[in-house]
Amino acid sequence: MAASLRCFLRSGKRAVLVAVRRGIHSSSPAAVQVTVRDALNQAMDEELERDERVFLLGEEVAQYDGAYKVSRGLWKKYGDKRIIDTPISEMGFTGIAVGAAMAGLRPICEFMTFNFSMQAIDQVINSAAKTYYMSAGLQAVPIVFRGPNGSSAGVAAQHSQCFAAWYAHCPGLKVVSPWNSEDARGLLKAAIRDDNPVVFLENELMYGVPFEVSDESLSKDFTIPIGKAKVERQGSHITLVSHSRFVGHCLDAAAVLAKEGVDCEVINLRTIRPLDVECIEGSVMKTNHLVTVEGGWPQFGVGAEICARIMEGPAFNFLDAPVTRVTGVDIPMPYAKILEENSIPQVKDIIFSVKKTLNV
Amino acid sequence: MKTMLAIISNALCRITGRSAVSGSTLVRRFRTDPVHKCDVHRLEAGPPVRAELTREQGLQYYRTMQTVRRMELKADQLYKQKIIRGFCHLYDGQEACAAGIEAAINPSDHLITAYRAHGYTFTRGVSVREILAELTGRRGGVAKGKGGSMHMYAPHFYGGNGIVGAQVPLGAGIALACQYQGNNQICVTLYGDGAANQGQLFESFNMAALWKLPCVFICENNKYGMGTSVERASASADYYKRGDFIPGLRVDGMDVLCVREAAKFAADHCRAGKGPIIMELQTYRYHGHSMSDPGVSYRTREEIQEVRSKSDPISLLKERLLSNNMASVEELKEMDIQIRKEVEEAAQFATSDPEPPLEELCNHIFSNDPPLEVRGTNPWSKLKSIS
């Protein structure tokens, strides 16, 4: 049983498609398990097949199958023209990708991690994000910048930064941060089909995590709209808003809190920019309490922005307590395991913050 | 007898390229003229040392360069009147580069340059009217007044880029798209002697050579990166060699024919699938770096005057045309008057056209998207943005 399950998971897409084609339906709507990695891989595969202008470039994406194996099998299938290994030249290859987008192609530019995107950030912001505006609509830049973002495990300060706030600050960019496999699949397909620069923030620790995905999401044209959050868990006492890996932490905290009679609503942002404020406001107007949870640093971050937006909108008058932000600790990421664990929000931190906000 | 002479005369005309024009003035139809030999790097041979020039071409190049010259001088005037604001980097002195390159490539080829872009914006097809109106920030500008001097665009012309050197990887990427699409087009990617020291150039050179991208990298060496002379900025000022493994040409950038021949040579090299090539155009700008730089603190007035009197690109072409009897003084003068008039009318438009409407402030954030709401300066200000 275990062996066949392992085999099933390893054969990935083929098995999934076979299952769908044979019309194997179970009684529950979500029958299939797919890891985030495979979801990303399948999304790219389908989009490469669908539109010949789409291509992938980055370090180790081709012959190495991807530094984190996200692009496994793609070079074998599509070859050198569509899957391009670059030298270690972020500023150069990012500019090349942006130029290619300007001249009619639809590149996917992979950063091995978003930490390295800092070397190329001028191309992302000044060449990609601003161009449609500066040209008054003459020059579009249909490009996706993707790669793992935020903290991993034991990779220390220079390899652990979260760039959600940095990129979400800039008009002209869309910034997307999927949590589970369905998010990853639908949002990546939407990002590739979008005619604008999209920053696609993945999470290395989530790549290997399997999730059940609906049959509907396996359709080749399944996309998730950019700019819409999802309520992952309905609740009435307090709203938890998060993105990426910490959505899972929020759901875990909600499960523990439910046993103590605290009913949490958990919102998965899915998109950082544009932020789905209406979804958050609607929830806060119901629960009267809000906690934001993110892995990035507190100052000028995603939670800070949510606080400001709530204050400027109708939901402010429904708050029974100030908004609480749960964030990464305001320090460069340390290496030692005990220090690293205590540098990012844990489930117990979320539980503690919820109780403090509710004054229970 | 008369018919016989006419037949012989016509035959002689065809052989020598002379054509009989009204009256007694004979004007040559074409000529092959000598041009300076280019220094080469990693090339067995350079471009031809003789350039063919027809009368039509000569007049066209003259018109192009004179239009750019008058347009830039008009921009200078408008800037001093504070009708143009912000950055304004003028191209006068360098006209032969833009005119020569455009003469060598096809409209379907691609071109990208840095911020000293008005000349290329014109040669790539944008009218003087739309350029000046963009400089004055009016709705009739090529970018509707939203881009300004450094951000003008046209089909197959990618600006106008403000960040020094950033346009070079972009150009290599455009060349990659040409190769990918198999359309036999090339990308001409321009940068200055200042940008030549940017790291991202060398990253672009490496990838362009590795992947044999059809990219002509062109360094417009006008001897100064802002206020810093090439001797003070570059350990090696042989910019045509800086591509190392990429072949290079050093070209007299004040001679439009020399530029054209070299650019043709370079374009052929790329189209033959041989990969990228570098051209260094030795040229000069009369103005300072921008309108806020008088341009005389780091170079002498004598130097500027010497270039004007000995190497002005428009004068050089004019001399060629006149001494080879390919045009008359009167017709060139007539053309000058015509061009001045055109530029004056364009300036009139640029000063009288209204500024863009405030309702369009937030438009063009995203392409092909439904309308969205944009926060104004305060929470009650909700502005609309359409694609």
Image (cartoon, coloured by chain):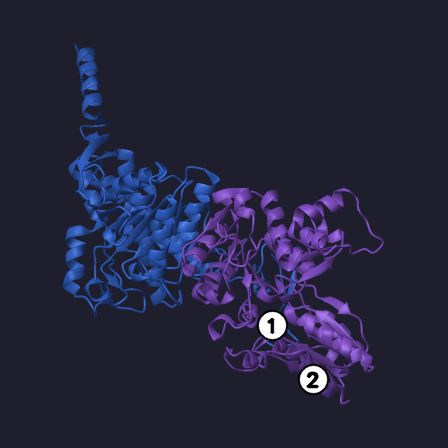
Identify the colour of chain A in the image. Answer: purple
Q: Residues within 10 Å of mark 2 (few under 14, many from 20)?
A: some
Residue in front for this viewpoint, B242 or A220 = A220
From the viewer's perspective, tell me whether residue A303 is left or right of residue B130: right
Q: Residue at x 21, y 30 (%)?
A: B28
Q: Quadrant of the N terminus of chain A?
A: bottom right
The image quarter in which residue A293 lies? bottom right
From the viewer's perspective, tell me whether residue B216 is left or right of residue A194: left
Using the rendered image of the protein, determine whether residue A293 is visible from the camera's viewpoint. Answer: yes
Q: For mark 1, give the secondary structure.
A: loop
**Which chain has been coloured blue in this picture?**
B
Say what amino acid the circle numbered 2 marks: Ser
Image vertical order of residue A328 relative to residue A52, above or below: below
* Image position, residue B248 (x, y; %): 25, 47
Task: Write down the chain letter for disc 1.
Answer: B
Using the rendered image of the protein, determine whether residue A284 is visible from the camera's viewpoint. Answer: no
Q: Are marks 2 and 1 in contact (CB under 8 Å)?
A: no
Q: In 3D space, how far apart are the residues under numbered discs 2 and 1 (Cα atoms)?
A: 33 Å
Say what amino acid the circle numbered 1 marks: Gly
What residue is disc 1 on?
B376
Q: For mark 2, give the secondary structure.
A: helix
Q: Quadrant of the C terminus of chain A?
A: bottom right
What residue is disc 2 on?
A353
